[in-house]
Image: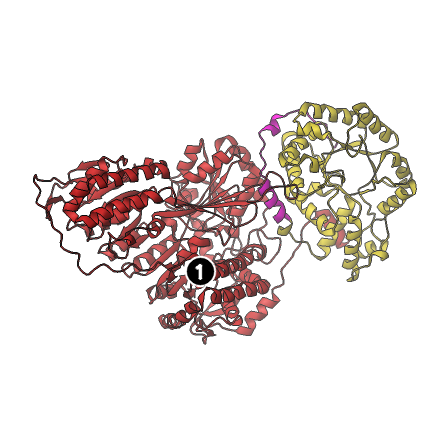
Amino acid sequence: MSRVSEIMESMEYGPGIEDSSAARGWLAERGAFGHFIAGAFTAPGTTFTTRDPSTGEALAEVTQGTVDDIAAAVAAARKAQPGWAALGGHGRARFLYALARHVQKRERLLAVLETLDNGKPIRESKDIDVPLLARHFYHHAGWAELMESQFPGMSPLGVVGQIIPWNFPLLMLAWKVAPALAAGNTVVLKPAEYTALTALAFAEICREVGLPAGVVNIVTGDGATGAALVEAEVDKIAFTGSTEVGRLIAEMLSGTGRKLTLELGGKSPFIVMPDADLDAAVEGVVDSIWFNQGQVCCAGSRILVAEAVAGRFEALLKARMARLRVGAPLDKSTDVGAIVDPVQKDRILSICRAAVDAGAELVGGQAQEGCFIAPGYLRGVAPTNPGMSQEIFGPIATLSTFRTADEAIELANNTRYGLAASIWSESATVATDLAARVKVGVVWINCANLFDAAAPFGGYRESGYGREGGRAGMLDYLADAAPEAPAAAAPARQVAAPAIDRTMKLYLGGAQKRPDGGAMYAVPGGLAPVAGRKDVRNAVEAAAKAGKWAAMGGHARAQVLYYLAENLAARAGDLAARVGPAEAEAAVAIAFHFAAWADKFDGANVQAKPGHLVNVIPEPFGVIGLRCPDAQPLAGLLSLALPALAMGNAVVAVAAEADPLVLADLVQVLETSDLPGGALNILTGPADDLAAHLAAHEEVAAFWTAGGAGAAIDLAAAGSLKPVWHVPPRDWSAPVAQGEVFLRRAVQMKTVWLPYGALPAGAGGGAY
Amino acid sequence: MANPGTALRTEVFETLHINTPATERRAATLAARRSLKKDHQAAWLLNAVRCIDLTTLAGDDTEDRVARLCAKARQPIAPDLLEAVGVTGLTTGAVCVYPTMVAAAKRALAGTAIPVASVATGFPAGLMPLDLRLAEIRYAVDQGADEIDIVITRAHVLRAEWTALYDELRAMREACGGAKMKAILATGDLKSLENVARASHVAMQAGSDWIKTSTGKEGVNATLPVSLVMCRAIRDYHVQTGHKVGFKPAGGLKTAKDAIAWQVLMAEELGRDWLRPDLFRIGASSLLGDIERQISHHVTGRYASAHRLSLA
């Protein structure tokens, strides 16, 4: 029997190995790699070996970056930055366009190199990673071009340190480098130690297109190199990686005033409703947790399926899993390639063991010879099981059931993470409701792991903060125009002696409460309560229960804020007696201003892919903590609290410590203005202590400080990875105390993908 | 082996949901996920030849034209090429003609095991009185047809008249007697994938041996997304009843690459059994020429010019 006849019997696929000789030749020509600093490769220093995880074969020697290397790279970036910014949007757009074109022209080299170094299937490198890389540079060439008109008054941050992971080396590079360059920053990028090769190939491309020296610098190395970058004199750190390291970075940057964005881990829910297309949902699992060996931060790793369809879903899932091919990453018929490193393989297996020890059943998921793990899932897994809460970062999902939509959401949100969610339902009504209620930055309705440069990506909760992609992503690489600094000392105010003694209390849950400790302290005009830890706790508890405020919608919130303005105006005389007429008038103006905004700070529908409705929706954080400015106690508090409230957040405000008595009048106004109890809570007392307690509270999702103790607040907030906005000082009774700058910080963007199509392509269909 | 069918069971498809964009995504990556090179590619292409219903359904068909087609069905790939890859006895899966050409086809294929398939039931629109459509089936069977490719009444699907569709198909199945029945759903007329899935289930419940996408005369013929939906219906029917129903895409497959893509679909969604001609047929006429050219290239290393390969 001939070979062909035999195959006609077996109908096997046979090997289809991508030719890697060109990439290997490229590596051989270069020998050991140095860093890419100031437009040139440095001589290799102390090197380590980077390997093909599928075979263990050594691919190249890469230099371990030192503190000095980092310093040299930062200096080069610093030197290059003014010139790069001065090129203007169009000048930078030309370079970004050239980068986009060149990565396209080098797509084969990049794809093969990526697969060799990382172990991901060549199909994914070729069809997903590299096209998205090019797409990202094209899109950001556009933002550079349009920068002056689209981001008026904003300026680049300066030098940005960027640390990227090993799961999508090229794509993460693009997500970091493209927006930073478009905005006029220069960068020092540290690729992951396992996967530095494509970043070095990209460095060559930078040279090829004539990118000015120092605009992109790449320093290779391990975590120590990354730590050196975090400690270097940069203006911002952008990090993608584990939540543990993200927390460490946030702590290291405490009090430095450097900007930080974090894209961290996830344990994203994958919700299958009873009216889902189950075959489509099963394929969604393949695209989620069995994509890139499950080494995907946003992978839908927690499958939650309606009990009504759980049996059928699991049968389909099992059958589909059985057809996945685990094998050589360069084989074009491979679905699941190699885990990036034996260390990661061991980690995945140990979490699976712990999950099984805790009572779960592992279906599939066997460790295989070499750096391979078969796809699998954990069934019979309860929320208490470590497999259900820990990010496995391997091709292992969890499978559990729910009864009703509310239980699905409860389970979906029962996690410290909030990166992404995948929702499967053929009802637009049901799916969009679940999308609104799930606490994550990216929602994929009837799809999974779709990415586009125009669609912001990033997390809620401990999945980090900041966005990559689209307008929101650009804003994270730009600085607002600095407000004019306030006059050195606030003018002393005339405090009228009250006719009758005033009693000031804390304002908690819509009621005036005595402080838990019972103590008061002397302030101009009387006594103010000394709030303590328990009062912080009570205030946050009250704020967390004020969900009604967000649910009211923009128009109803606007009405309340207008009514507040009206009542402030009615009490203008009393307020002016305490803080002077300018600040009293400013209070009314601020309330009017943010009432106006309450129903207008809209999201966007972005042009990601045809046939996909992609909405970017600003959502409130939940509870925002405020440390109000010491000066101008009334206008300062309102300038921070009202934008947060306008966007639907609940607020716990630590008032100006020295001079808070005017807030006793404000509380009376609040009580008569229909603001739901708990929406705004006001604490007085030792502001720095209270702010630190508040910033540490895990229920508080974001923190703004316009006062002192920045480092303590940063450190406290780092524990639960909440963003901290250090609000630049300003005259709080001037127009700079208003505006979109505040609103932007009061929301987090949720990107919701909804592919549509009544009929197959070619049979008709609309396009948004 | 024949599918006996079941009673009409609308409950198996009434709650069925199909998400069109997701189906298209899967269809788009199916072929990209599998690669066939060298001997494997040649073998898969020759397997596609085994599954072709070599078809002529034109108003100007003559008996001589049909005889020429049958000669190609007997010897679909040049003997020297087949010898070079060591494959013997290769024929197409069947020859497919109009009822009046069945007798000529039978004569031309005498001495071979190649079945003759005949379209019937007022092909392609099917809008004739039922008794005439049934009579046409009987005529074709009488002429010697081994397989009958019937067309369904699309209106029954568009109006969700499942009982009417089922009864009609049952009557046709009955009229086929010993011949096997392929039910053409005309998916290009049904438009929505949920319609396609429902029609697939009714056709299988009524005893079809294959379900087939298209007549080749609709605006859109076989596509991968439609085929994916039909294959999943076949899979579900197999799970529900234990009966294996075949699949026949028709009208959209023109290149060797198409032949590979559809076979990958069968292998991935249904498995090895559905790569045999008893469960997989390709309705095509020009496809064979492109496959022969690829085989020629595989053997000689050169691309053949069309005039060097025998016409059908």
Percent of width and height locating residue A187: 42, 66
Q: Secondary structure at mark 1?
A: helix
The amino acid at mark 1 is Met
Q: In the displayed structure, does residue A668 sit left or right of residue A183? A: left
Q: Is residue B282 visible?
A: yes
Would you place residue A526 above or below residue B18 in this image? below
Q: In the displayed structure, does residue B3 sit left or right of residue A58? A: right
Q: What residue does disc 1 label?
A: A147
Q: Which chain is yellow?
A: B
Would you place residue A126 above or below residue B208 in this image? below
Percent of width and height locating residue A347: 43, 52
Dividing the picture into quadrants, the one containing residue A646 is top left
Q: Which chain is red?
A: A
Quarter holding the C terminus of chain A? top right
The boundaries of the magenta stretch are B1-30
Q: Is residue A400 visible?
A: no
Residue drawn at x 53%, y 68% as measured from the top left: A205
